């Protein structure tokens, strides 16, 4: 393939996220390629797509899944459920990678570590409220805690969690401005 995937989040609650592919050679867009290849929709409110090796990982927030697809064919390799032990929503938001692991921040205040070979969740680290961004620098993850879902009550968060990858746990919080969102390593 010589082109780019375009993730379309769709409208929240309408279960209409989609994945398109723009081919550089033909200059054509293949709309909703995920549904064509897999025979089902992508889910409700896809927020992030990142490539690692031969796979693309897609965070589908309101469907509570990480969809892992083969980069060349678009075929679903695994749909990883992102639910708590009691079946509640985690609402995965954004993804980063470090040393053969995918790290996914979720609105439930956790970061999941997924092994990129077995595509299984190895564990969770607790962070701040409603994390809405994640990046890696060195052997540490930086997670922006927005508290954005708490705007009408508790109030927004104003911290960035620093999480060590070994052991996989939050080691400190850094106070920043209110409602931090995207975060990137320099």
Image (cartoon, rainbow, N blue to C red):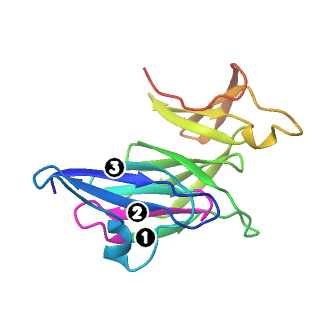
Q: Is residue 171 left or right of residue 34?
A: right
The answer to whether one can see residue 27 in this image is yes
Quarter holding the C terminus?
top left
Q: Is residue 152 left or right of residue 19?
A: right
The residue singled out by tag 3 in the image is: 51
**Are dots 2 and 1 in contact, CB under 8 Å?**
yes
The residue singled out by tag 2 in the image is: 68
The residue singled out by tag 1 in the image is: 78
Which is more N-terminal, label 2 or label 3? 3
What separation in Å lies between label 3 and label 2 (alpha carbons)? 10 Å
Q: Name the residue rendered at 27%, 59% in the picture.
A: 71
Query: Which quarter of the picture shows residue 8?
Result: bottom left
Q: Is residue 156 above or below residue 53?
A: above
Return the x and y of residue 128 as percentages of the image width and height. 73, 37
Quarter holding the N terminus?
bottom left
Q: Nearer the viewer, residue 154 or 98?
A: 154
Magenta segment: 61-76
Return the x and y of residue 132 as percentages of the image width and height. 61, 39
Q: Is residue 175 left or right of residue 70?
A: right
Secondary structure beneath dot 2 equals: strand
**Are dots 3 and 1 in contact, CB under 8 Å?**
no
Count of marks placed on residues = 3
Secondary structure beneath dot 3 equals: strand
Secondary structure beneath dot 1 equals: strand
In reply to whether residue 64 is colored magenta, the answer given is yes
């Amino acid at each position: 393939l010589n082109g780019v995937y375009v993730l379309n989040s769709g409208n929240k609650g309408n279960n209409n996220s989609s994945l398109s592919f723009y081919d550089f050679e033909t200059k054509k867009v293949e709309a909703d390629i995920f549904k064509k290849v897999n025979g089902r929709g992508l889910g409700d409110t896809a927020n992030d797509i990142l490539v690692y090796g031969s796979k693309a990982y897609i965070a589908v927030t309101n469907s509570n899944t990480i969809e892992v697809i083969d980069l060349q064919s678009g075929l679903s390799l695994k749909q990883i459920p992102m639910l708590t032990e009691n079946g509640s929503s985690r609402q995965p938001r954004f993804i980063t990678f470090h040393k053969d692991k995918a790290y996914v921040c979720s609105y439930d205040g956790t970061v999941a570590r997924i092994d990129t070979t077995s595509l299984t969740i190895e564990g969770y680290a607790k962070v701040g409220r409603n994390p809405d961004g994640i990046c890696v620098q060195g052997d540490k993850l930086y997670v922006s805690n927005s508290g954005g879902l708490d705007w009408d009550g508790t109030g927004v968060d104003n911290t960035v969690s620093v999480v060590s990858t070994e052991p996989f746990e939050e080691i400190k919080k850094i106070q920043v401005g209110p409602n931090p969102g995207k975060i990137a390593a320099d």
